[in-house]
Image (cartoon, rainbow, N blue to C red):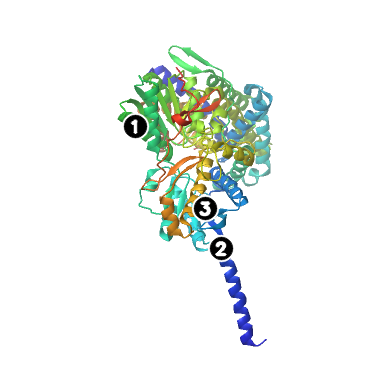
Amino acid sequence: MTPTKRIQAISAALAALALGTAASAEDVLKIGAPLALTGGLADEGHKQELVWKMWTDKVNAAGGIDVGGTKMKVEIVEYDYQTDGQRAGQLAEKLINDDEVDVLMAPFGSGHTKIVAAVAERYQIPLVACVASSTSVYDQGFKFLFGTLAPNTGMTEAMVAEFKAKMPDLGTVAIYGRDDVFPKSMATATSDSAKAAGLEVVYDELYPVGAIDHSAALSTIKSLEPDWIYMTGYTQDLILGRKQMQDLGIEAPIITMVTGPAYKEFTDGLGELADGVTSSTWWHHATGYTDVAGAWPSTDAFYQDFLEASGGEDPDYVHGSCAAALDVVADAASRAGTIEPVAMRDALAATDMETFYGPIKFGGNGMNQGREMPIIQVQGGEIKILYPENIANAGMTFLK
Amino acid sequence: MGLAQILANGVVLGTLYACIAIGFSLVWGVLNVINMLHGSFIVLGGYLTYFAWAYTGVSPVLILPFVAAILFGLGYGLQYLFINKVVSAPVLTTLTLTFGLDMILYNLMTVWFTATPRRVSMDFGRLDFWGIAMPVDRLIGMGLALLLTALLFVVLRTSRIGRAIVAVRMDREAAALMGIKVNHIYAVTFGIAALMAGAAGSVFAMVFPVTTNLSGVFLGKAFVICVIGGLGGVSGALVGGLALGIIESFAGVLIGPQNAITVGFVLMLVLLIVRPQGLVGVKGYE
């Protein structure tokens, strides 16, 4: 072989190789995901990882998604960002530049989503967030960011209206929240919604992160005899709070804990004491959506698959929202007929679909607007849905 | 709301705080070691109690001695095998060692038990008297805390090993010259501290949901209590714990719960400036 021929042969081989990779790259929708698989948010990161694997396994087994007439497989490229926000941003850049992903999924929580959103915006890659509910993430003018959770305020207004309807003489509320991003924003939003609806907020205080005793605050609340006690915090705070209410003999017709009953650990830790506690959540597996689009035709179909995949654990809203986020991506790719990022972004903005997780329709800021978030209550150790009407499966009971 | 209720809340919380701090104070006072493992020992005690209760249904009060014995063994072993090698090094060295050991223990517990909050859900009920509502489980906790503290006081005062611990605390070299096996005494002291932490964990499992990320909170409380109360004796932890409990209880009502913890730290700062040995501490141990 002469040197010229050798060069020709090598070029031909390289060209074939390049064509080959180009062809296979076109048949795969690559989704990048920086995940907190170690560190403080590891539990939440693993929840995202689990449902995304369930989703891709199910969709790929069915042949993939239909994009402009071709069936495309879906591949998730994930990296562990070790619960370090800055690292999440760096890995998002790596996913875009090295792995050439077509779409990004945001990590857990509003703070880390904000960091990744700035990167996605710079490279003009669509980003779907499934666990970021603070409006402050979405009011930055980002055009490529979409979120499947609805704003906190939507939750609190609906709850105040519903409780007033169920208990017409509801007059006073005591609000006691953890001084931390999400619990604090829920406490503030509830206080505002309650005042707007004409309720008297008789107690409105925060407790610090790391509080291991609530007797001082609860004793004050007891003396105020409110109709409604609203406490926010993480599971451990809420278990302790509910128990201390019992210990101190505090009774109120309505006790709400956010997001306590949305997690199974809450009812497990409290036993009978959990009974009657109300809460709001973005999603609960008892919500019975049927005949919907996406990988699962109904909430129950998702629930059954989840039980199998998790070894019998119940899913929470993180699982639901994150699995549905991939339904949104697949739906947008199908409607766009291409996986080109700008076309995908426009298709995402026009999303209007029903999933097992509920309706998804993004508002102008990219947050899901089309949702009536369930109000739930623990009744006889089970989670019952009180609201919205169309999926409610129990009437509200009062604790006093 | 009644003054009596606030005070009662504070006293009960304070004895539980004392229970947290007593082992930490002992190790700090006798070994001059800031034991970063202390919070995790309490959490371990809590978990052992929870699982023993969940599988056998035996009352946590009866489980407590067994948990305490296990923790004594663990503490003795850790001190004898690891900490004794560096116990006479500057305080930063031992702090680093116990910090490292704590990371191992903490992460092992997170892997074994997960961070899910677990609670011994036995309902002991509540007593109402003089307008005060008082949960029985906290009263049991308070009783156990006082009993353990008294027991330790008596052991340190009257028993041979107790006198040896006090002797080592006063003067290590002189104690060694009197024939006291210093390394053994150090290990016993560390073991007793772990025992107290384990017992505190058992008490806490009845009152609080136990989860691994409480270990830092317990350690922080122990630190503040020791600085407030003072080192060098059993009474320091008791006085410091009660003071912190009562202050947090009143501050929580008067200036709001989010500032109650800050008040404890401000008190600690003031004491460090005006009375570094603590409220009842012996001068020379600060």
| Residue situated in front as seen by the camera: B93 or B42 | B42
Mark 3 vs 2, N-terminal side: 2
Q: Secondary structure at mark 1?
A: helix
The relative height of residue B214 versus residue A62 in the rendered view (above or below) is above
Q: Chain of mark 3?
A: A
Which amino acid lies under the numbered mark 2 shown in the image of this protein?
Ala
Q: Chain of mark 1?
A: A
Which amino acid lies under the numbered mark 1 shown in the image of this protein?
Ser
Nearer the camera: disc 3 or disc 2: 2
| Residue situated in front as seen by the camera: A356 or B144 | A356
Does the image show residue B233?
A: no
Establish whether labels 3 and 1 are both on one chain.
yes
Horizontal and vertical percent position of residue A30: 54, 57
| Residue receiving disc 1 | A193
Which amino acid lies under the numbered mark 3 shown in the image of this protein?
Pro
Horizontal and vertical percent position of residue A22: 56, 67
Does the image show residue A321?
A: yes
Residue A25 shows which numbered tag? 2
Horizontal and vertical percent position of residue A400: 44, 17
Q: Residue at x 45, y 49 (%)?
A: A113
Q: Residue at x 40, y 40 (%)?
A: A151
Cα distance between the residues tagged 1 and 2? 50 Å
| Residue receiving disc 3 | A34
Residue B175 shows which numbered tag? none
Assess whether mark 2 and mark 1 are in contact (beta carbons under 8 angstroms): no
Specify few, some or many for label 1: CA neighbours under 10 Å numbering under 14, 14-19, or 20 or more: many
| Residue situated in front as seen by the camera: A145 or A219 | A145
Q: Chain of mark 2?
A: A
Specify few, some or many for label 3: CA neighbours under 10 Å numbering under 14, 14-19, or 20 or more: many
